[in-house]
Amino acid sequence: MLNRRGLIGASMAGSALLGAGAASADETGTRLSKPCVISTWDFGVPANQAAWAVLSKGGRALDAVEAGARIPEQDLKNHSVGRAGYPDRDGHVSLDASIMDERGNCGAVAALEHIAHPISVARAVMEKTPHVLLVGAGALQFAQEQGFPREELLTPESRAAWEAWRKDAKYQPKANSEVGDYGKTSGQLGAPGGKGNHDTIGMLALDAQGDLAGACTTSGMAWKLRGRVGDSPIIGAGLYVDNEVGAATSTGVGEEVIRNVGSFLVVELMRQGRSPQEACKEAVARILKKKPAAKDIQVGFLAINKQGEVGAWAIQKGFTYALCDAASQDRLLPGPSFY
């Protein structure tokens, strides 16, 4: 497993993201000016920049997180989010996403096949139906009715990885294995996406009006059972926004986040007075207390409050998160962790 030095060295390869704009996180987290946007993992940097294009013009946080989340969804080198995601054990690419605005409105899709931008379908569910979550064939039907094009999402690169995996056909998650695998051959910076693991982009924005919104999108666990759904499209698990308090999102093995309703827990802890960093740390600690064996996998939380204070915490070293405000649009930090 990479140590912190190894993680930073890998992240700097081919990029200057940890240059003059870098910050460091301690027990108290960090604070951004308003407007701002934060997101999980190295590929959060370009996603944040797309969101910043909206926020810097006075745009709404909801529009910003949708625009940002679409960036990794369309990245053909990203095998843990969107159209190039690794498939399930039967070769089907299925995507999950959720979105939530400052008014408590939310929408989500799960096990959605053949649609490249599930985050935009999730927003359509929120705005054009009386429902919160659509799944499987029904989600696909709705997406096509809304004009989203049906596509083949299994790329040649993802198919080759799947066929290589099928030779042994064992799924054995290893914490942060994506740090070493993602971009290894292409030279493209980015932590998530290794064939032995999966991850998610969770994005939280605070706009110039002081309103919060969040988005979360993923292709889920590589080689999963068909129909498996993780925490990303589950409101309160992978994402939660309360405009009176703050917002939180998660990444890692979604089953453990679902069991603890993780993002809702983080927000409620902030409501009780914890800083975002303290809330994330306590939520991770709760996972470990209930299931000590979880120390061998990865879960990370990222949160922001109404004052622009940001915090994160993970089980293992290796989790990174990206920050963006008027001062800098390319900051990347290693997430604090217990192990």
Image (tube, grey):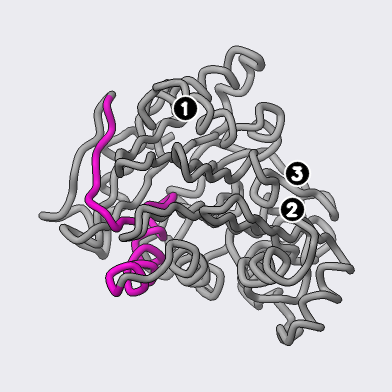
Name above or below for residue 334 compared with residue 148: above
- Residue 171, given in percent of the width and then of the height, sits at 72, 43
Q: How many angstroms separate mark 2 from mark 3 (CA)? A: 9 Å
On the rendered structure, is 262 left or right of 323?
right
Q: Are marks 1 and 3 in contact (CB under 8 Å)?
A: no
Magenta residues, as a range?
28-57
Q: Is residue 117 visible?
A: yes
Depth-wise, is mark 2 or mark 1 nearer the camera? 1
Label 2 vs 1, first from the N-terminus? 2
Q: Is residue 159 visible?
A: no
Q: Is residue 3 magenta?
A: no
Tell me the residue that label 2 is attached to: 223
Disc number for residue 271? 1
Task: Report which quarter residue 50 is drawn in.
Answer: bottom left
Identified by mark 3, the residue type is Lys
Marks 2 and 1 sit apart, C-alpha to C-alpha, by: 38 Å
Q: Give percent across and percent down for residue 10.
A: 31, 50
Residue positioned 62% across, 72% down in the render? 120
The front one of 55 and 223 is: 55
Q: Earlier in the sequence, mark 2 or mark 3?
A: 3
Q: Residue at x 63, y 38 (%)?
A: 253
Measuring from the top left, give residue 244's x and y in whole percent. 46, 40
Q: Secondary structure at mark 3?
A: loop
Q: Amino acid at mark 2?
A: Trp
